[in-house]
Image (spheres, rainbow, N blue to C red):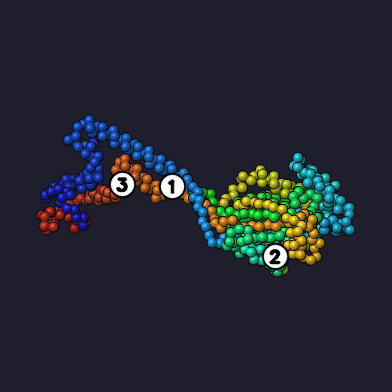
Amino acid sequence: MVIITKDAWGTKTEGEDVESTLPTAEYFGLQDLASDYFQVLRAASRPRVCRLLWSVLTLGLLSLTVFMVYKLLTDYFQYNSFNKISVKWQNSLELPAFTICSTNSINYTRLEEDFKEYAPELLEVINSYLIKMELYKGESNIEEYFDETEFEAFFEFDNGSFSLKDAYGNLVYDLILSDWYMVGGKKKIFDYFNGSAFLEYTELGQCLKFNDDKSMVQKTRGSGGGFSIDLFANVNTYMMTTRTRGFIIFLRDHGETVLLNQGGYVIEPGTETFLRLQKRSVTRLGKPHGTCLNIRSNLTKMEHFRSIRECVQDNSLEAMLRGCACMPSYYANTRFKLGRFDILNANVKIIKEAKKNVSYFNSTVKRRKREGGSADTSSNGSEDKISDKDGENVTPTPEYEDQSIYGTDYQQYVCTFSQETMCNFKREEHQNEFGKSYQCHEPCSFNEWDASVGVTSFPPSEKYFDKFLKDLYYDDINFTYPIARDNLARLHIYYDDIKTTEVVQEKTYEIQNFIAEFGGTVDLFIGFSFFTVFQLVEIGVAWCFWKIMKRNKSIRRESLPSYNGEGKDIVVYNMNNV
């Protein structure tokens, strides 16, 4: 049953047709809805000139409204954003993770002593190779630059069963004179039984790493509340081609891995260096307002999303895998130490494909020949297994976890020293040429640190050395003031002010701002609001009912008692012909 009051339909008597009972504009509410426009445009009592002028004005307002709405839509769909910067003062603040490396990657003194005794002729070839590598400036193709016959003896040795860099590389503990460092004014001891906590493989050899576990927290201002350590350069062990004395300090986010000798702060021996930190906590927006993207890093097992630096490294190193058909030793060792056998096995697949068509060094740099099998990737899809020459699955044994990758079945896919040094040139060329196409994105939340550097002489005087340093270190070192000035460096990493600068990327135009401005615009110019929308919905529903009732073939009128005592009849239409 559809019941409609008599006032809405007017009077009706028996025998009237259906058309005379159709709803009027008053019923639909159109006259109320547009009463203002009706008064100025259609009211017969108004002069025609006034109605014409109001018609022009109304058309202009409608046009202006359309233009303003277009501008609002354009602004909203540009997805603009801005950086909101604020400073947050704190009672304590964790120090960044950081890595300390020597600028010299090979202990040339040990290498020279061994080769002078057992292979003096080969030592001369190695020296010639190092000098020629240092003189190479990219003026010609590197394959043509090196005469294979000139260095054939070195290449044959380098293709042997061990790595030159692994055998003679600087050890991480060669960087320090004592087994302690300072944090917050308290002495901390290196855990020699957990060396992996302080060891990181990089292109610069073994490096010291700190604070990936966020355990170093500064609670008081100044250098006394931060991190301090004394470093020893061992300059007498430097290769003849080492360009810079001292150390490089890489500041990084917790869990981020440093693989390349790019960036960082250089610490020179004979100095006391102060790195005063400023921390920024950055939050970025994803699409469509921003470009941040959270991708798990291949370099770590920690809860860490890949940084732009790690993305660039991954892409350039993958180019090196495909170009040289081998893994850099530091790259392989880092993943091996972290137990990332899934990544190592994926690299093995890339190398096996690349070996079919090596784009760099087809003859000059020979593949390393290892004893044993081919180490094919297991066909059963296991992430931590490789296959030996008999096709049996070989799982890296637990004792390898605290050793280097050499001595495992992966070693035959690791670059030789000569391969690695030559391939680095090609990798840098690839990075310079294709670096902009790597499509690297910032993670959506990360921390970064800047540092201002202060430097003074250290030790400041021989009297200071005699009183405070001479007896501080190991007795087996012939530690004199000249040696200290040539090798010793003291490093402080700390906050001057315990505060964080928070940088938050926010939307310039939120959806609620768009709705408010849209409503204000249309209401200002044409008197349109959400209330009007609801009225239009009501009219639409009534119009649908009217269309249904118009199609009815029979209408029966029944008299009903008066409504509210006002004597209004109610017309009842039987929709089912009952």
Question: Closer to the camera, 258 or 502?
Answer: 502
Q: Circle 1 — which element?
A: loop
Q: Circle 2 — which element?
A: strand
Could you classify mark 2 by the number of other residues whose Cα lies within 10 Å: few (under 14), some (14-19), or many (20 or more)?
A: some
* Amino acid found under the numbered disc labelled 2: Trp
First in sequence: mark 2 vs mark 3:
2
Q: Which marked residue is nearer to the observer: mark 3 or mark 1?
A: 1
Question: Closer to the camera, 30 or 244?
Answer: 244
**Residue 375 at x, y = what percent?**
73, 61
As measured in the structure, the alpha-carbon distance from the residue carrying label 3 to the one carrying label 1 is 21 Å
Residue under numbered circle 3: 529
Residue under numbered circle 1: 509
Q: Which marked residue is nearer to the observer: mark 1 or mark 2?
A: 2
* Label at residue 180: 2
Q: Circle 3 — which element?
A: loop
**Residue 170 at x, y = what percent?**
76, 58
* Amino acid found under the numbered disc labelled 3: Ser
**Residue 424 at x, y = what percent?**
72, 49
Could you tell whether 250 is left or right of 78 in the image?
right
* Label at residue 491: none
Q: Residue 253 falls in which quadrant of the image? A: bottom right
